[in-house]
Image (cartoon, helix red, strand yellow):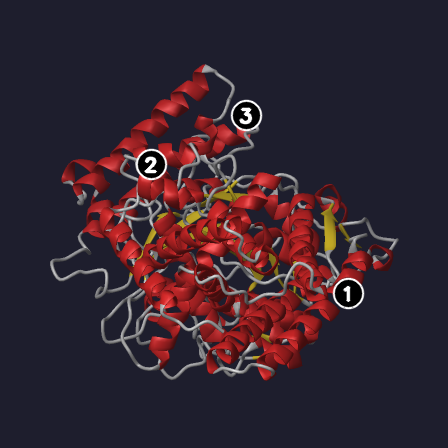
């Protein structure tokens, strides 16, 4: 990456890069804390070697392993704080270095998979928000991949194209900034006759789409011409989401379609690749590769934006910010992609489920930006098309010349030859015996194709840029129930472990390819789920010992106690400080650390178990899509900051069991102290149990106090109570050490 003083002074400044002033302090603290971690591991080893019984030896070994994992994961966290960077861009200088005819074309990829979990209205809003970019229409193409192969989604996009012919000129005339219709009409927009008419038109379009989704079919009354009828006739009787032919439908053609003012409309193209139960489809990665090939045949823009269907554009100037990097000749040949942070609307005040993921989407990317650049996080990312065909100095040629990144498309997108070729490259058998998914395109081999693709690209030598403007470039939805949050995290956990324990593991292959700091950055995410090991051990073992009045940690009067206190306070204080300095609040940080603990005995644990069972060849659940459909009562509880437990989930069982065990242990420990017990020796265990109890308040509330539909299911409560009793009974019969 180029520092400010390296930018040529003879050219207008397009971007700057500065490093954080906290860099030196971070490094000093990391050195001191590392010594403390090593001292703790030494203490555990001494305790294990001096054990006189198998039980005490086993406990010492368990805590040695737990704290080793804690230490390893902490060290990977520090890699993000060694060289954090901040950037600024100056899009106002673009005109000084770039002629209008030199502005590159852009292809936008939007992915959706299920109209019942990802409402087509959200897809429509995302598509319209990017079609309305301040960018030449003839250089902008929007591709929507419908991996569910649903005529409901196609109908929604047909309606979007019609409404877009009114919406796009409305945005231009009124200099609208919020170009997502739903967001605009929910904001404090200027009231005028034109805006009122536009709102009526939008509500009418939205109602038609929702009616079709609710009915589950596109009725004839909504089909207005023969072209639309031919499109919907492709959904024949044998058509299913898992077995269907390729459907490519051009809904807006920049060469033919005009808006109501006579200006050209950007291309809008619906793509549903062929699927067969006999061919692997590789989930979202496979859908993106199909779009990569189809778009190459039809438009082949040198820059590609990938977006989730619920992540709408929030800034019409975003493409100009991107060009500040891609038009800079000093870094253009090295930069493979530009990643924007995922930001969300609708978060409740304290973000109770920690869905903001401030570390993953803000703190960590800024830390990686000072090294070789951030990882790809699935959406809001602008790629150079060249990046998908080998490293900067090792081009991997695709099997067809039409798929090369330098191929020039000379025919209209609806030409028969173009459409025939597009159907050919979207065939489910096309990738057989090819480099797609391994050396070309988005990479297969992990459920988290975004993380794995970004990782592989940087291992090949590409650098990336983190662009974090004051106004969020994109805004998305968040899950509003705990079950959806945990299922999403479990899916990520399985995918990350697939990378962590592969031949491309960041601690081996990554460190060699990118260097130790970048390797550790990627290792932090890859080994995310192993947090479950120490968190689960600390959630149960100290408490079970406390139930028996057995001390397993140093006494308060012991010198080793100071080491424990320093490690706990130091880690939490640093974590809180970094979080708050990155535009956070204390209450959101508290929610974040609480969810980290809860995920440790739920999604991380279940993700680790599912990964291990897959390695053993045991069948497990497939890909589970997070629902984006909002329930009225659930939304109300979420806005009030109330946890949602209202479904049966196996992940709630260890969570509520841990809550009960810690509550019993905490009060049992206090009672023992008041009766003359060894407070000096049991303080650490009482503190740990009490800390867990404080964090588990929403669980106790859901099990006992609440009467709404979001309370803990009775069956889960009974199972957890039985397990807690069984653990208590087993602990009571364990001989003291």
Whether residue 97 is situated above or below residue 74 in the rendered picture: above
Going from the N terminus, do you reach mark 2 or mark 1 first?
1
Q: Which residue is mark 1?
A: 32
| Whole-percent x, y for residue 151 in the image | 24, 50
Q: Nearer the viewer, residue 54 or 10?
A: 54
Q: How many marks?
A: 3
Mark nearest the camera among 2 and 1 is 2
Mark nearest the camera among 1 and 3 is 1
Q: In the rendered view, does 204 fall on the left or right side of 52?
A: left
- The local secondary structure at tag 3 comes to helix
Going from the N terminus, do you reach mark 1 or mark 3 first?
1
Answer whether labels 1 and 3 touch (C-beta < 8 Å).
no
Would you call the spot at circle 2 few (<14 residues within 10 Å), some (14-19), or many (20 or more)?
few
Q: In the rendered view, does 450 fall on the left or right side of 274?
A: right
Give the number of the disc on residue 340.
none
**Residue at coordinates 17% horizontally, 45% vertically from top-left?**
217
Whether residue 45 is situated above or below residue 84 in the rendered picture: below
| Whole-percent x, y for residue 362 in the image | 62, 51
**Residue at coordinates 38% horizontally, 76% vertically from top-left?**
612
Q: Quadrant of residue 42?
A: bottom right
Q: Is residue 154 visible?
A: yes
Mark nearest the camera among 3 and 2 is 2
**Residue at coordinates 69% horizontally, 48% vertically from top-left?**
577
Give the number of the disc on residue 174.
3
- The local secondary structure at tag 1 comes to helix
Give the number of the disc on residue 705.
2
Q: Quadrant of residue 225?
A: top left
Would you call the spot at circle 3 few (<14 residues within 10 Å), some (14-19), or many (20 or more)?
few
């Amino acid at each position: 990456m180029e520092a400010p003083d390296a930018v040529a002074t003879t050219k207008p400044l397009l971007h700057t890069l500065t490093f954080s002033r906290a860099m030196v302090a971070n490094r000093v603290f990391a050195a001191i804390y590392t010594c403390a971690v090593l001292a703790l591991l030494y203490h555990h080893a001494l305790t294990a070697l001096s054990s006189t019984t198998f039980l005490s030896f086993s406990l010492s070994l368990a805590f040695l392993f737990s704290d080793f994992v804690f230490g390893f994961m902490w060290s990977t966290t520090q890699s993000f704080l060694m060289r954090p960077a901040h950037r600024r861009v100056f899009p106002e200088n673009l005109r000084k270095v770039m002629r209008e005819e030199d502005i590159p074309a852009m292809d936008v990829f939007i992915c959706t998979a299920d109209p019942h979990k990802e409402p087509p209205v959200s897809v429509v809003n995302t598509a319209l928000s990017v079609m309305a970019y301040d960018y030449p229409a003839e250089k902008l193409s929007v591709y929507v991949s419908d991996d569910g192969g649903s005529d409901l989604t196609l109908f929604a996009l047909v309606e979007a194209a019609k409404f877009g012919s009114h919406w796009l000129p409305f945005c231009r005339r009124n200099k609208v900034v919020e170009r997502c219709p739903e967001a605009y009409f929910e904001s404090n927009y200027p009231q005028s006759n034109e805006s009122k008419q536009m709102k009526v038109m939008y509500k009418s379009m939205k109602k038609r789409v929702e009616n079709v989704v609710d009915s589950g079919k596109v009725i004839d009354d909504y089909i207005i011409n023969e072209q639309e009828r031919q499109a919907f006739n492709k959904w024949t009787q044998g058509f299913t989401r898992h077995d269907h032919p390729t459907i490519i439908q051009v809904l807006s053609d920049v060469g033919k379609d005009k808006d109501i003012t006579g200006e050209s409309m950007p291309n809008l193209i619906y793509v549903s690749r062929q699927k067969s139960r006999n061919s692997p489809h590789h989930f979202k990665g496979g859908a993106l590769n199909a779009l990569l090939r189809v778009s190459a045949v039809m438009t082949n823009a040198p820059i590609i934006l990938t977006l989730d269907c619920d992540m709408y554009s929030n800034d019409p100037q975003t493409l100009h910010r991107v060009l500040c990097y891609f038009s800079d000749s000093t870094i253009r040949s090295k930069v493979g992609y530009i990643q924007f942070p995922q930001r969300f609307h609708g978060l409740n005040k304290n973000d109770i489920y920690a869905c903001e993921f401030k570390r993953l989407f803000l703190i960590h990317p800024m830390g990686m930006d000072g090294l070789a650049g951030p990882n790809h996080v699935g959406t809001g990312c602008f790629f150079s098309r060249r990046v998908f065909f080998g490293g900067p100095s090792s081009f991997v040629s695709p099997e067809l010349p039409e798929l090369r990144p330098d191929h020039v498309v000379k025919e209209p997108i609806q030409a028969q030859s173009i459409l025939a070729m597009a159907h050919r490259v979207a065939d489910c058998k096309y990738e057989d015996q090819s480099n797609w998914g391994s050396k070309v395109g988005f990479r297969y081999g992990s459920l988290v194709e975004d993380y794995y693709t970004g990782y592989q690209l940087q291992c090949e030598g590409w650098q990336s840029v983190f662009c974090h403007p004051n106004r969020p470039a994109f805004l998305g939805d968040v899950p509003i129930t705990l079950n959806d949050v945990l299922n999403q995290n479990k899916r990520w956990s399985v995918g990350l472990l697939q990378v962590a324990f592969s031949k491309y593991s960041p601690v081996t292959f990554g460190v060699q390819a990118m260097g130790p700091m970048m390797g550790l950055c990627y290792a932090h995410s890859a080994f995310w789920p192993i947090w479950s090991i120490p968190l689960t051990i600390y959630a149960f073992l100290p408490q079970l010992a406390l139930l028996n009045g057995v001390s397993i940690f140093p006494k308060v009067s012991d010198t080793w106690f100071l080491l424990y206190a320093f490690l706990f306070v130091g880690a939490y204080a640093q974590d809180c400080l970094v979080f708050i300095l990155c535009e956070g609040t204390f209450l959101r940080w508290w929610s974040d650390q609480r969810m980290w603990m809860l995920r440790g005995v739920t999604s991380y644990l279940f993700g680790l178990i599912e990964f291990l069972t897959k390695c053993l060849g045991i069948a497990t659940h497939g890909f589970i899509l997070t629902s984006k459909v909002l329930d009225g009562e659930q939304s109300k509880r979420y806005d009030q900051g109330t946890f949602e437990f209202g479904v049966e989930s196996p992940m709630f069982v260890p969570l509520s069991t841990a809550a009960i065990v810690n509550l019993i242990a905490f009060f049992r420990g206090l009672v023992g102290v008041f009766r003359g017990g060894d407070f000096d020796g049991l303080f650490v265990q009482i503190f740990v149990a009490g800390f867990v109890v404080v964090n588990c308040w929403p669980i106790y509330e859901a099990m006992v106090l609440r009467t709404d539909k979001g309370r803990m299911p009775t069956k889960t409560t009974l199972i957890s109570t039985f397990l807690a009793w069984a653990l208590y009974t087993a602990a009571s019969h364990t001989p003291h050490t």
